[in-house]
């Protein structure tokens, strides 16, 4: 097995719980540390706190899909999409900043 995968620091896959407010309710989300770091990076890139980013992501996903069967899994795939180069367009970022103001 490749050392970059097999020899990775166990701290990256340590599970971390964070309490956040989603759709007006406090909830706990458990993800590996590396995913929390990526979500912090994604949120920062949109000038949002991570809790605010998660709340907006949840609301938008409900609007598009009607429900979210597994939000933690959605967050992991969000990180994967981000690593594959997916980014919001400038018009989406502008709307986000307008709504946040």
Image (cartoon, helix red, strand yellow):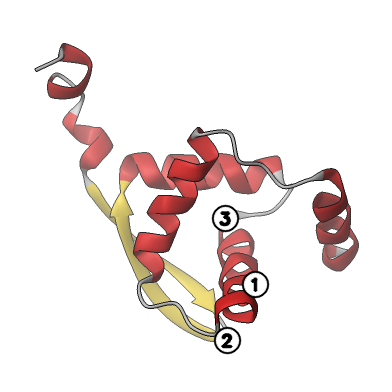
Give the mark nearest the N terminus, 3 or 2.
2
Find residue 60 and name its label. 1
| Callout 1: SS | helix
Q: Quadrant of the C terminus?
A: bottom right
In the image, taking residue 21 as reference, residue 17 lies left or right, namely: left
Q: Position of residue 16 (x, y in %)?
A: 29, 54
In the image, taking residue 34 as reference, residue 3 lies left or right, namely: left
Q: Position of residue 46 (x, y in %)?
A: 72, 47
User: Separation of disc 2 and disc 1 at Cα?
Assistant: 14 Å
Give the mark nearest the N terminus, 1 or 3.
3
97 in relation to 2, above or below: below
> Mark 3 highlights which residue?
50
Q: Residues within 10 Å of mark 2 (few under 14, many from 20)?
A: few
Q: Residues within 10 Å of mark 1 (few under 14, many from 20)?
A: few
> Mark 2 highlights which residue?
24
Q: Quadrant of the N terminus?
A: top left
Q: Residues within 10 Å of mark 3 (few under 14, many from 20)?
A: some
Q: Position of residue 90 (x, y in %)?
A: 84, 44
């Amino acid at each position: 097995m490749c050392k970059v995968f097999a020899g990775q620091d166990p701290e990256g896959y340590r599970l971390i719980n964070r309490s956040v407010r989603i759709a007006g309710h406090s909830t706990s989300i458990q993800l590996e540390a590396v995913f929390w770091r990526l979500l912090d990076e994604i949120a920062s890139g949109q000038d949002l706190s991570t809790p605010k980013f998660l709340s907006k992501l949840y609301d938008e996903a409900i609007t598009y899909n009607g429900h979210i069967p597994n939000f933690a899994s959605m967050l992991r795939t969000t990180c994967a999409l981000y690593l594959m180069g997916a980014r919001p367009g400038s018009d989406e970022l502008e709307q986000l900043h307008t709504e946040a103001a």
